[in-house]
Image (tube, grey):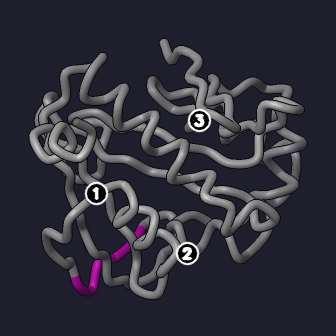
Amino acid sequence: MSMQLETKRLLLRPWLLSDAESLYMYAKDPAVGPIAGWPPHTNVENSREIIRDVLSATETYAVCRKEDNRAIGSIGLMIGTASNLHLPDTQAELGYWIGVPFWGQGLIPEAAMALIRRGFVDLYLEKIWCGYFDGNIKSKRVQEKCGFRYHHTNKDVHWKLTDDIRTEHITCLTKADWLIRNE
């Protein structure tokens, strides 16, 4: 079960079905989903299904501002076989997105650093992977700010959720490198 994490400005908490309207408000925007690898949400019921079927996964959190606790984005660690990267149980993949009105405020790096700490300290992970699609410079910057290093590129990947062909850049952060950064 996911717990609640707190940062200076954010609460990271499990998704609730009551978050569906807020989720739909940000996830319907075509600037958000497709660049992250998923189609825009079509209505509140679609968002409710996504909460039930996808966002209810272990270590997946609603990103909420402390002042109103409204879900404005999502962040999660997909550990081992839950990842698309076919990882061992000592490794995870980090995924995230945030609604357009909150872009450029450093909220996702803030959330990511809290979840990375949880991964290495509480969940005893040895390595965390992350990726971004060609052209997603904002996601690349988040990964750089958090200490991820370029690992490899997968070209001509058929992405099932959006049924298209993409180039994906994969980065990783080891526990050893994270410890050095956080001494």
Label 2, on which residue?
A: 35
Bounds of the magenta span? 155-159
Residue type, mark 1 in image: Gly
- Please report the residue visible at 48 percent of the width from the left and 12 percent of the height from the top: 1
Task: Give the crowd class for mark 3: few <14, some 14-19, many >=20 residues within 10 Å.
Answer: many
Task: Give the crowd class for mark 2: few <14, some 14-19, many >=20 residues within 10 Å.
Answer: some
Horizontal side, residue 165 vs residue 135: left or right: left
- Please report the residue visible at 53 percent of the width from the left and 14 percent of the height from the top: 3
Residue type, mark 3 in image: Leu
Helix, strand or loop at label 1? It is loop
Give residue 147's mark. Answer: 1
* Pointers 1 and 3 in contact (C-beta within 8 Å): no
Q: Position of residue 45 (x, y in %)?
A: 84, 42
Helix, strand or loop at label 3? It is helix
Give residue 84's mark. Answer: none
Q: Position of residue 114 (x, y in %)?
A: 46, 34
Label 1 vs label 2, nearer the camera: 1
Residue type, mark 2 in image: Ile
CA–CA distance between discs 3 and 2? Answer: 18 Å
- Please report the residue visible at 70 percent of the width from the left and 76 percent of the height from the top: 31
In this rendered view, identify the residue nearer to me: 163 or 11: 11
Question: Relative to residue 122, is residue 120 depicted above or below?
Answer: below
The prevailing secondary structure element of the residues shown in magenta is strand
Give residue 55's mark. Answer: 3
Whichever of labels 1 and 2 marks the residue nearer the N terminus, that label is 2
